[in-house]
Image (cartoon, grey):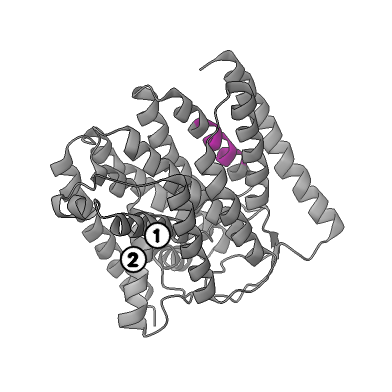
Amino acid sequence: MESNNIIFSILLLFLSFFLNKYILKIFNESKYNFLVDADYKKPQAFHQTKTYRLGGTTIFITLSFIFFYIYFINNIYFAEYVWFCVPFFLLGLLDDFKIKILPKFRLGAMILLLIFLVISNGIYLENSGLEFLNYLLKIDIFALIFVVLCFLFIINGSNLIDGFNGLLAIHAIIILSILFFINLFNANLEFSTILFFIILTLLIFLKFNFPKAQIFLGDSGAYLIGTLIALSVIKTTIINLSISPFFFAIILIYLFFEVFFSFFRKIFFSKQSPLLPDGKHLHMLLYRFFLKKNKSPIKSNYSVAIYINLIFLITMLPAIIFMENGLFCRYYFFVLLFIYIYFYKTLYKKVKLK
């Protein structure tokens, strides 16, 4: 890494730390009522004290400094990150400010945004790892739908698992770290540098979110992180053609399948709208399992992030070793789906959820 980037990395750590620290201090001392999460009765709430949704804002401000630095010092403009991150951060911020938008309208807005952004930035995938799907990807409209769905699953998956201290932040750090080393070892130095800066930003946020949360990500932070993950995976897929597309499906499996599984579970088993929240997601079941064991809400909360991400990291190791083996990655992807379903069913029975 160049000396300029090393110096900026150190400055970035200090900037991000003091930004989180002093924005939180300002809000605590002023007793602002906006951007505060004090709703303890919603299905996805597992906190017991008022906590500010400032994570998305502090990460967004830090990212702005990063992209300004990359542009003015290295003369590199990551246009797609700016184009995608700004509108999705603002969309999530509306909910953080408690401006209620019906789920179907929010989903519609996301789809329209993604269609415009994908087309205007020329983001398309040509290799899916499956012959018949590769043939369909040659059709423009199908290729557009496929990429839009990829973004939708990852962004909404990020928002869905956000709710426990450190769960999404640690998960994002693991995924982005894998992408960082892939691009570093394949000499994609400019892109690996931006990934490194994003990881540093998330690590500092984690200091204020884990194990005890002083700050929440909020919808703005969850959408922002989901956008960063989706863009980084797609960009890594395009510039590293030797790696199996199923490997990238594997590292996204938790975010993707949590949304996919939840969608059909709500329709066929819970008999409710798939757009409405409930308390039966994998991380929520695991929380209730820990709560039955140790009776401590705080310990149970952060234990969810530790266990899920530890299991995720362990299951990623075989895929990392055989990332260029398309046949292995394809079958291993489906093995992990069955492991998820088995784990979910086992937890569901243990907590005896009605």
Image location (x, y in percent) of residue 244: 23, 40
Residues at discs 2 and 1 in contact (Cβ within 8 Å): yes
Q: Amino acid at mark 2?
A: Phe
**What predominant SS class does the magenta segment belong to?**
helix
Q: In the displayed structure, would residue 32 be above or below residue 119?
A: below
Callout 1 crowding tier (Cα within 10 Å): few <14, some 14–19, many ≥20: many
Tell me the quarter of the image containing the C terminus.
Answer: bottom left
Q: Position of residue 142 (x, y in %)?
A: 29, 59
- Position of 77 compared to 239: left or right? right
The residue segment tinted magenta is: 196-204
Residue hosting label 1: 153
Q: Is residue 16 magenta?
A: no
**Residue annotated with mark 2:** 260
Element type where label 2 sits in the image:
helix
Residue 73 sits in which quadrant? top right
- Amino acid type of the residue tagged 1 in the rendering: Phe
Q: Is residue 199 magenta?
A: yes
Q: Nearer the viewer, mark 2 or mark 1?
A: 1
Q: Position of residue 22 (x, y in %)?
A: 78, 43
Residue 135 is situated, as x and y percent measured from the top left of the image, at 18, 52
Marking on residue 244:
none
